[in-house]
Amino acid sequence: MAIVKKLLHTRLRVNDLGRTVKFYQDALGLTVARRSLSPRGAQIVFLATPNSEEEIEICQMPPGAPAVEVQPDLMHLAFEVEDLGVFAAAAAKRGFKLSDGPTKTGSGATIAFIDAPEGYEIELIEHAR
């Protein structure tokens, strides 16, 4: 049986590449690893996350492609934060408020959510200490 070696990236398709990349940079501190143009003409930006090998691929299809419509609760990305209160305060100063939480989970972790552009959700997790 063939098995995979590791997760490399997760792709999110968007309507406004610039706005989305700016959100991930400004709200979460991700950095642009590289940019490219696909053979089909899609603009692609790979974002690097601190302490992770996996990347997030943000893709905007060429003009004329159907618009992206993200269904509520379809998917989300989850990021660990050291201190959710400190993160939330710093994000709020930059104009990014939590959309849900903070909420204590049964495992003792605290979670919250922040809305990314175009309907994607970001889960923030502070593990119990």
Image (cartoon, rainbow, N blue to C red):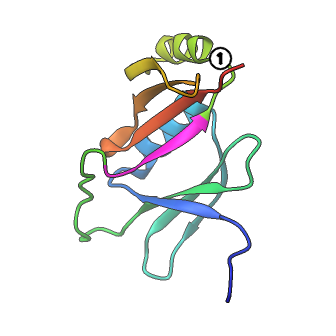
- The reply, left or right, for residue 105 in relation to residue 70 is right
Number of numbered discs visible in the structure rendering: 1
* Place of residue 20 in the rendered image (x, y in percent of width and height, measured from the top left): 44, 44
Between 83 and 59, the one lying in front of the other is 83
Between 65 and 122, the one lying in front of the other is 122
Q: Is residue 54 above or below residue 18?
A: below
Q: Is residue 15 above or below residue 72?
A: below
Local packing at callout 1 (Cα closer than 10 Å; few below 14, some 14-19, many 20+) is: few
Q: Is residue 70 above or below residue 109?
A: below
- The reply, left or right, for residue 60 in relation to residue 93 is left
Q: Residue at x 67, y 44 (%)?
A: 49
Q: Residue 81's image quarter?
A: top right
Tell me the quadrant of the picture where the C terminus can be found: top right
The stretch drawn in magenta includes residue 77: yes
- The reply, left or right, for residue 7 in relation to residue 5 is left
Q: Residue at x 65, y 26 (%)?
A: 127
Q: Which residue type carries mark 1?
A: Asp
- The reply, left or right, for residue 125 in relation to residue 5 is left
Magenta stretch, main secondary structure, is: strand
* Place of residue 5 in the rendered image (x, y in percent of width and height, measured from the top left): 74, 73
Tell me the quadrant of the picture where the N terminus can be found: bottom right
Residue hosting label 1:
83
Between 30 and 61, the one lying in front of the other is 30
Q: Secondary structure at mark 1?
A: loop
What span is in magenta? 74-79
* Place of residue 97 in the rendered image (x, y in percent of width and height, measured from the top left): 41, 18
* Place of residue 89 in the rendered image (x, y in percent of width and height, measured from the top left): 54, 10
The stretch drawn in magenta includes residue 46: no
Q: Residue 15's image quarter?
A: bottom left
In this view, the residue farthest toward the bottom is: 1
